[in-house]
């Protein structure tokens, strides 16, 4: 009797309690368990996110009035540069794949781990190394980088600030991203449970699969380009620097060949999360499964061919502008298809407005605004007027914060009980949602208005006629941050002292993570499941 | 919005109104559906969901209609842009040189100024250059912007139809005093312009 109960207990020991080769802190930082690595990522990425938010808050505070409000121009320029680097390279690019992808991809496809567990841990160390270099670049003498996160040459070659170390950081973070993408591609190809054909795979793994290919194919280009800037600074090779006969527009091409697809590295995984949330909280099958899966691939493909739309005013040929504008409009279509399918999924559903669902619905709304303002920017004559104004700043915050940010928040509320076996306070979660959603729109919407009125971006100071919009925007940032504080408090409280739960399926989902223990055991499954049906069957709803 | 100052501005603003109208329509459509479905098919009202796996007819409709709309938007943007792409042959040429953090305008007779004076109703071609890093020549009232970079030969053009004074920004981030790199475009009568030019 006794022996037997111990055996059962041992079998259901969660990954949090599992004793591996090491214990304590080493049990975490040397663990190759995909779930523990996900938590490692969650901790460091969250810390960086909060630092990025603080910088964003200070940027907005500085812009509350004309002239100097709290900081001088050099500090301001460093702040928006470091804010961009942190938010993009340390939060949104790794974000959803590294946290939820690591934790749930293997479970959702019925695998015990990713294909290369040690490589997976290595990517976390690369991430930490890259982030340490970012900190170092801020505090070393020479000063924090001030080139903008785009590192445009010639400025990035001429500035006296710590550019080389910043560029090295981005280079290393790029490697972390490539290896994560590669790991996921191989995992999805090779480790799906028996019976799980491609079209029996849930949509979150589909999104990670499309993202993985973008990461593997385009990240090397930015890696090489960043190295070339370092060479340019150290040896003056004259590839980009016009004073040495180089071509600064060539640099812009190489930069955006990566950095435009990178937008989809940020957005597509979040779209995958939203596809899960919409289905689970509508309690029905998803509308247009194949359309959503293929649109991820279409976005990955066409999204890699539109980088030139960042450069319509740079003096590219009219033919290039014509082609890039046209393909930009083409990439709008798979995004629109996703939005229509998500919306149609709600039809005849049985919708529960749980906190994750609120974030999912807000995601669709914010992404629609982001996408539609993207259409405005893709229109050649409008872009000539709008590019490099606050309009673009509003646009990419709607697209990136609206998708990756709200995807992370919704995903956290959705999966935290599964990950930690603890419940969060739903009332607080809903309060945090409304502050975030309202604050977000007050913060970013005025940027469209003043952008159309001609307010240039990356400006420390501005003309008095723009002040009212800056003031509204800054007030919005305060509301948003109240929402964030409540969110962070709610999540930390849940993880530390939330009510314990071991309910396997607390939300009525049908993908595999709802058929494993809460929290999952060390290798997820006692027996690898055999898949026979679709991922979102909801058989009880058939006529 | 800013006062109409040229033919080109008028056509860009028309495009803006059309595109914004289309965008607002789709945003309202999606928002109304999201809110309506969330209420109508709420669990309290509709405890049992019904599976709908998809509809090829709908997928085709909402692929083709947006495709036609975006192609139309693409086209009107391109038509405006083509007008801006090549300056008319009879344009007066002014060289703008950007450097950290000021503008310098050189006229055909060698006169140099830091404010851009131009005569009204005259095609003006701006040749753009920079001495140090990337800058961008931006006059919001005229809806024109073009990067001014070292060792490159960018240009843009405009024709001011109204007298007045307009803001001219640097739109490409260029370092410490980027936000102070502002000057004025002054549109004056032909007579005043010639007097000023030959002073």
Image (cartoon, rainbow, N blue to C red):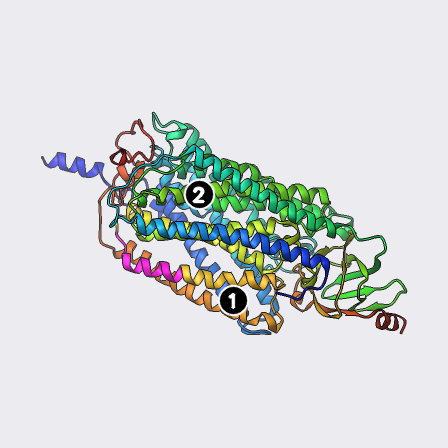
Circle 2 packing at 10 Å, graded few (<14), some (14-19), many (20+), is many
Identify the residue position indicated by label 1 in the image.
A60
Per the rendering, the mark at residue A340 is 2
- Residue A267 appearing in the image: yes
Measured as percent of width and height from the top left, residue A414 is found at 32, 48
Residue at the spot 48% in from the left edge and 40% down from the top edge? B62
Question: Which residue is located at x 52 percent, y 52 percent?
Answer: B23
| Near-viewer residue (A237 or A465) | A465
**Chain ID at mark 2:** A
Who is closer to the viewer here, B41 or A63? Answer: B41
Q: CA distance from mark 2 to mark 1?
A: 34 Å
Q: Is residue B30 above or below residue A71?
A: above
- Label placed on residue A298: none
Classify B96 as above or below A12: below
Q: Secondary structure at mark 1?
A: helix
Q: Quadrant of the C terminus of chain A?
A: top left
* Mark 2 secondary-structure assignment: helix
């Amino acid at each position: 009797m006794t022996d037997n109960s111990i055996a059962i207990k041992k079998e259901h020991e969660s990954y949090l309690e599992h004793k591996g080769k090491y214990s304590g802190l080493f049990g975490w930082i040397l663990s190759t368990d995909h779930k523990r690595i996900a938590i490692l990522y969650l901790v460091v990425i969250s810390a960086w996110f909060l630092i990025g938010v603080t910088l964003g808050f200070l940027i907005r505070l500085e812009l509350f009035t004309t002239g100097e409000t709290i900081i001088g121009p050099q500090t301001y320029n460093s702040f928006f540069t470091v804010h961009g680097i942190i938010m993009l390279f340390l939060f949104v690019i790794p974000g959803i794949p590294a946290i939820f992808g690591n934790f749930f991809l293997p479970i959702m496809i019925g695998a015990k781990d990713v294909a290369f567990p040690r490589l997976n841990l290595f990517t976390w160390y690369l991430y930490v190394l890259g982030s340490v270099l970012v900190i170092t670049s801020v505090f070393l003498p020479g000063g924090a980088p001030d080139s903008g996160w785009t590192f445009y040459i010639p400025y990035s070659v001429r500035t006296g600030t710590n550019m080389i170390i910043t560029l090295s950081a981005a280079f290393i973070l790029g490697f972390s991203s490539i290896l994560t993408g590669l790991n996921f591609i191989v995992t999805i190809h090779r480790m799906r449970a028996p019976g799980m054909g491609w079209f029996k795979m849930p949509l979150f793994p589909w999104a990670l699969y499309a993202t993985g290919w973008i990461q593997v194919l385009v990240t090397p280009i930015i890696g090489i380009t960043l190295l070339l800037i370092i060479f340019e600074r150290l040896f003056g090779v004259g590839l980009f620097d016009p004073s040495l006969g180089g071509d600064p527009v060539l640099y812009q091409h190489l930069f955006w060949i990566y950095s435009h697809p990178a937008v989809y590295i940020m957005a597509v995984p979040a779209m995958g999360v939203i596809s899960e949330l919409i289905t689970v909280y509508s309690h029905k099958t998803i509308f247009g499964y194949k359309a959503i899966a293929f649109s991820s691939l279409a976005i990955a493909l066409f999204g890699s061919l539109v980088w030139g739309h960042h450069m319509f005013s740079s003096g590219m040929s009219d033919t290039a502008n014509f082609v890039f504008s046209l393909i930009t409009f083409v990439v709008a279509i798979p995004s629109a298809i996703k939005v229509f399918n998500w919306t149609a999924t709600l039809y005849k559903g049985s919708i529960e407005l749980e906190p994750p669902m609120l974030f999912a619905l807000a995601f669709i709304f914010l992404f629609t605004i982001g996408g539609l303002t993207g259409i405005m920017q893709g229109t050649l004559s409008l872009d000539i007027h709008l590019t490099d104004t606050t309009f673009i700043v509003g646009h990419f915050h709607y697209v990136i914060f609206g998708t990756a940010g709200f995807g992370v928040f919704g995903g956290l509320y959705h999966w935290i009980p599964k990950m930690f076996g603890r419940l969060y306070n739903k009332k607080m979660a809903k309060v945090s949602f409304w502050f975030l959603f309202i604050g977000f729109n007050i913060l970013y919407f005025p940027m469209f208005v003043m952008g159309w009125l001609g307010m240039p971006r990356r400006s420390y100071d501005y003309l008095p006629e723009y002040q009212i919009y800056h003031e509204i925007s800054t007030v919005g940032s305060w509301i948003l941050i109240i929402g964030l504080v409540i969110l962070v408090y709610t999540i930390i409280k849940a993880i530390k002292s939330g009510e314990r739960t071991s309910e396997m399926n607390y939300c009525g989902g049908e993908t595999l993570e709802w058929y494993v223990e809460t929290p999952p055991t060390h290798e997820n499954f006692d027996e690898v499941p055999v898949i026979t049906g679709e991922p979102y069957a909801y058989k009880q709803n058939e006529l | 919005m800013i006062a109409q100052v040229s033919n080109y501005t008028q056509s860009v603003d028309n495009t803006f109104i059309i595109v914004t109208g289309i965008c607002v329509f789709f945003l309202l459509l999606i928002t109304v559906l999201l809110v309506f479905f969330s209420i109508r098919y709420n669990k309290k009202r509709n405890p049992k969901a019904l599976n709908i796996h998809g509809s090829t007819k709908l997928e085709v409709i909402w692929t083709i209609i947006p495709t036609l709309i975006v192609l139309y938007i693409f086209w009107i943007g391109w038509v405006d842009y083509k007008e801006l792409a090549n300056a008319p042959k009879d344009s007066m040429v002014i060289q703008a040189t950007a450097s950290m953090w000021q503008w310098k305008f050189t006229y055909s007779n060698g006169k140099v100024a830091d404010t851009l004076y131009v005569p009204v109703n005259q095609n003006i071609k701006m040749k753009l250059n920079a001495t140090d890093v990337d800058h961008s020549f931006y006059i919001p009232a005229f809806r024109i912007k073009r990067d001014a970079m070292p060792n490159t030969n960018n240009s843009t053009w405009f024709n001011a139809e109204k007298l007045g004074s307009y803001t001219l920004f640097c739109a490409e981030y260029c370092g410490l005093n980027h936000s102070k790199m502002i000057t004025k475009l002054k549109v004056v009568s032909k007579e005043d312009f010639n007097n000023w030019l030959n002073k």
